[in-house]
Amino acid sequence: MKKTYRFGKIGRNVLAWAMTGLMSLTPVTVYAEGTEGTENTAAEADGQAASSLSKIDNTKWQYNETDNVYYQTGVLYCEKPADESYEKLAVFVPGEYMDASDNGDGTYTCSVNMEAAAGEQGYTAGTAPIAFTVNTPGYMSAAAITSLADFSAAVKLASKGLGAFDQLDKGQGENVLFGYGDGERAHFDGLLAQVRENEGSDYADEYAADLEKTDALGHTAEERLHMYSPLHYLMSGSDGYQSSDVAQFFRINSGLWQSDTALTSEVNLSQALENYGADVEFTTVWGLKHTEAERTGDSTANYIAWVNECAAQMESKQS
């Protein structure tokens, strides 16, 4: 079913935020059309779909002084909601974009300031990036990121220092995890070791010494990393390609705001699995970091439901 969205006359392309469905924070565009507090029942002259949704009343804005944000909550976002207590959103507009007057009752009358700039990028109400998603179950969730550079600068800044998982001081947990089973920290990143050697780093000898060691079973750090990495067995250019039995089903959920690794890490894994012939359910989740990320529901219940679906597919193929 097609959904129609309309918001009050507060300026085109204003960067705002809406909380939909489970109240997860997602961006929304606010349009400069129509009259405040009225219904849009006629087709728009610009060819956009007509809607009977009420417009936002620009005399009813509230203000959060701490975050310098004007907002309205409880806005219905579809004409015939299945559940009016659920299918609502909240609109948030940066204070820089609003010219406001205090109504004296806790609300403000606002109009858009199209000249003011906000944020490190200096966006105006007319140039701010726009995205809108609906996370209500049953409808596809989609976010439009207009600039990967701006997105990365806002929520994907690297959370680890130089060396990432293999720190120069061996201070990461992975320096123990990929060590030699004796509880001692060790370097394990062969690529980083090569860089250190090429640049004549003081750390080069330390890296080389750790990488030459073997564990109790005679394996080097490189061999154990290959065992740990799915791509070693999935990529046709790898020595480990087709040397392992790859599972048929995979479920990958990733918090888009996680900053432990690059955006490409989970995407590369998903694509490699699909190219290998696996059945992959890959989901990115807005607003969550390195956690059990789910768009809706409980991670344990969702996982069990997915396992049951996979088992049913297997039984169906065997019957």
Image: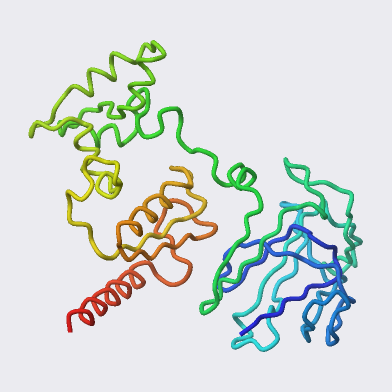
Looking at the picture, tell me which residue is in the foreground, 281 or 97: 281
Q: How many marks?
A: 0
Q: Name the spot of residue 261 as percent of width and height, x first.
A: 44, 43
Residue farthest toward the left in the current orientation of the protein: 217
Q: How is the image coloured?
A: rainbow
Q: Is residue 285 left or right of residue 54?
A: left
Q: Determine which quarter of the picture holds residue 110.
A: bottom right
Q: Is residue 282 left or right of residue 73?
A: left
Looking at the picture, tell me which residue is in the foreground, 60 or 185: 185
Q: Name the spot of residue 212 as percent of width and height, x first.
A: 19, 21
Q: Determine which quarter of the picture holds residue 45.
A: bottom right
Q: Is residue 244 left or right of residue 199?
A: left
Looking at the image, residue 290 lies above or below residue 165? below
Q: Determine which quarter of the picture holds residue 270.
A: bottom left
- The residue that appears at 27% across and 41% down in the rendered structure is 238
Looking at the image, residue 98 lies above or below residue 226? below
Q: Name the spot of residue 299 as percent of width and height, x first.
A: 37, 67
Quarter of the image for the C terminus: give it. Answer: bottom left
Q: Is residue 138 left or right of residue 281?
A: right
Quarter of the image for the N terminus: give it. Answer: bottom right
Looking at the image, residue 196 lies above or below residue 84? above
Residue farthest toward the front in the current orientation of the protein: 236
- The residue that appears at 36% across and 51% down in the rendered structure is 269
Looking at the image, residue 60 lies above or below residue 51? above
Q: Name the spot of residue 230 as percent of width and height, x first.
A: 28, 48
